[in-house]
Amino acid sequence: MENQMPRRQARENAFLLAFAQTFGELPLDEALDANREQDEEHPVDDFGACLLRTYYDHSAEVDDLIRAHLRGWTMERIPRVSITLLRLAIAEMLYGAEHKPGVAINEAVELAKTYGGDEDYQFVNGLLGSVAREAGLDGPAAEGDAAREEPAQP
């Protein structure tokens, strides 16, 4: 695929496709093909496709981690936007090639502010922070990567 875009846009487009996938049963490869052929407004580039494949390849482990960090919630109660963001961010943090958990968390929080309910971003931030701490991904190097590589402001 030749359409490379800024990581922030790639994550957002991957999120939009993953969110759309929660409404149907279309296999990921077919959804990616349809996106390439039909979605000129939100195309998924190579990085976005890699994020989606990473989540799909590790979906059971990712969902188990989310369940393990829920306090007073069930997976079924989590809004669809939030669960999609959590799944993609955890997959990126733990299994992605770039190893920038601070960036993954920041981007998920920003997308939650854009697409989620008024306070969903706080839930997303808290759960992702908890997963990162448990996995030992919240050290100064991780925070420095987020600040250096992709600033919070668009």
Image: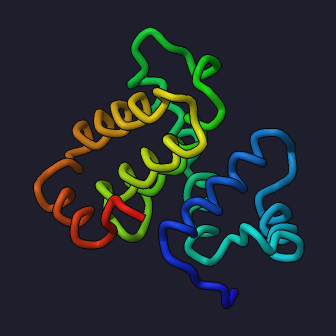
Quadrant of residue 69 within the rendered picture: top left
Horizontal and vertical percent for residue 106? 36, 52
Q: Compare residues 64 and 93 and report the one nearer the observer.
A: 93
The furthest residue to the left: 140
- How many marks overall? 0
Q: In this view, does 114 lie to the left or right of 107?
A: right
Q: Is residue 61 or residue 32 the one in the foreground? A: 32
Q: Quadrant of the N terminus?
A: bottom right
Q: Can residue 85 be seen in this view?
A: yes
Q: How is the image coloured?
A: rainbow
Query: At 24% from the left edge and 36% from the top edge, which residue is drawn?
Result: 134
Q: Where is residue 99 in the image (x, y as percent from the top left)?
A: 33, 64
Above-or-below relation of 44 to 128 = below
Does residue 139 appear to the left or right of 82 in the view shown?
Answer: left
State the residue at coordinates (55%, 73%). 47
Q: Can residue 94 be seen in this view?
A: no
- Residue at the spot x=42%, y=28% of the render? 123
Q: Name the residue at the bottom extreme.
A: 2
Q: Position of residue 12 (x, y in %)?
A: 58, 59
Q: Residue furthest top?
A: 72
Residue 114 is situated, as x and y percent measured from the top left of the image, at 55, 45
Front-most of 106 and 101?
106
* Relative vertical location of residue 85 with respect to residue 123 in this rendering, above or below: below
Quarter the C terminus occupies = bottom left
At 54% from the left edge and 62% from the top edge, which residue is drawn? 11
20 vs 123: above or below = below
Left or right side of 128 for 81: right
